[in-house]
Image (tube, grey):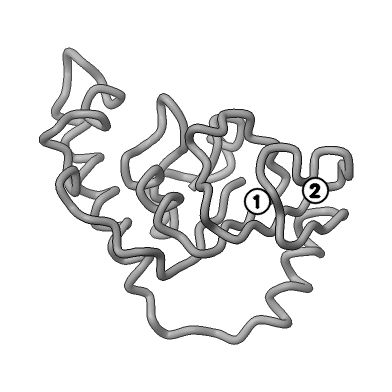
Amino acid sequence: MHTYRALDLYPFDDAYVIGGLGLIGSKAAYDAIHACELLLMIGSDYPYKEFLPQKAQVVQIDERAFILGRRLPVAQSIVGSARPSVAALLARVKSRTDDSFLSTYQRDWTSWTSIAGQESRSGPQQAAHSPASPGAQRQRSGGRGCAILR
C-alpha cells in the first residue's frame, strides 16, 4: 500500500499494490494495515494517525532521523536510505510461502476497483466506504502478515 505522496511510484495493476491509505485510499489497504502484525514504514511520515494501526509492531526506515517514531511507537528504527536498508533487511529475513494475508487483500482490492469503476457519480471514495463494499462485514483475522507503507 502507499500514501498519496507515493501514488506515482506504483502502478495500480502491479500484483502487490492494494491501493492507497487515507481519505482517498482503498478499503483493502485500510483493512490490511489494521490487520497486520508488522508495519514497515519506508520513507513515510504519514500524518493521519486514525489510518495507522495501533497494535502492529512498526519498523520505520528514513534518512530523516527526527521523524522516526513521530507518528507511532516503533519497535525498530533505521536511519538510512530506503534501497540499501530494505536490501539489508531482506538478507536477514526468511522467505515465506504462505501468502494468504496478501491474497486476501488482493481479492479485496480487485473487488474494490471493479466497484469503484462502476461508481460514475460518487467516485471511488464513496465506494470505499459503502456498506456494500467487499469485505465490509468480514471479521478481521487478528493479523497474520506484514503491511508496507511507503
23 to 109, vertically: above or below: above
Residue displayed at 25% across by 40% down = 113
Using the image, tell me which numbered label, if any, was put on residue 108. none
Q: Is residue 35 left or right of residue 131?
A: right
Give the class, few, some or many, for how many residues have Cα within 10 Å of label 1's Cα (few <14, many ≥20).
many
Pointer 2 and pointer 1: residues touching (CB < 8 Å)? Answer: yes
The residue positioned 72% from the left and 82% from the top of the image is 92
**Residue type beneath disc 1:** Met
Kind of residue at disc 2: Asp
Position of residue 127 measured from the top left corner of the image (x, y, whole percent): 21, 28
How many residues crowd mark 2 within 10 Å: few (<14), some (14–19), many (20+)? many
Residue ranking furthest to the left:
132
**Residue receiving disc 1:** 41
| Towards the viewer: 77 or 85 | 77
Q: Distance between the residues labelled 2 and 1?
A: 8 Å
Residue 112 in the image, given as x and y percentages of width and height: 23, 41
Q: Residue furthest top?
A: 121
Q: At x 41% / y 26%, what residue is drawn?
A: 24
Residue 55 is situated, as x and y percent measured from the top left of the image, at 52, 55
The kind of secondary structure element at disc 1 is strand
Residue 142: percent from left, percent from top:
36, 64
Residue ID at (18%, 29%) = 130
Q: What number is the disc on residue 62?
A: 2
How many circles with numbers are drawn on the protein?
A: 2
Quick check: 105 above or below 7?
Answer: below
The answer to whether 118 appears left or right of 51 in the picture is: left
Left/right placement of residue 108 relative to residue 41 reads left
Q: Earlier in the sequence, mark 2 or mark 1?
A: 1
Kindly state the secondary structure of the residue where label 2 is placed.
strand
Looking at the picture, tell me which residue is in the foreground, 71 or 29. Answer: 71
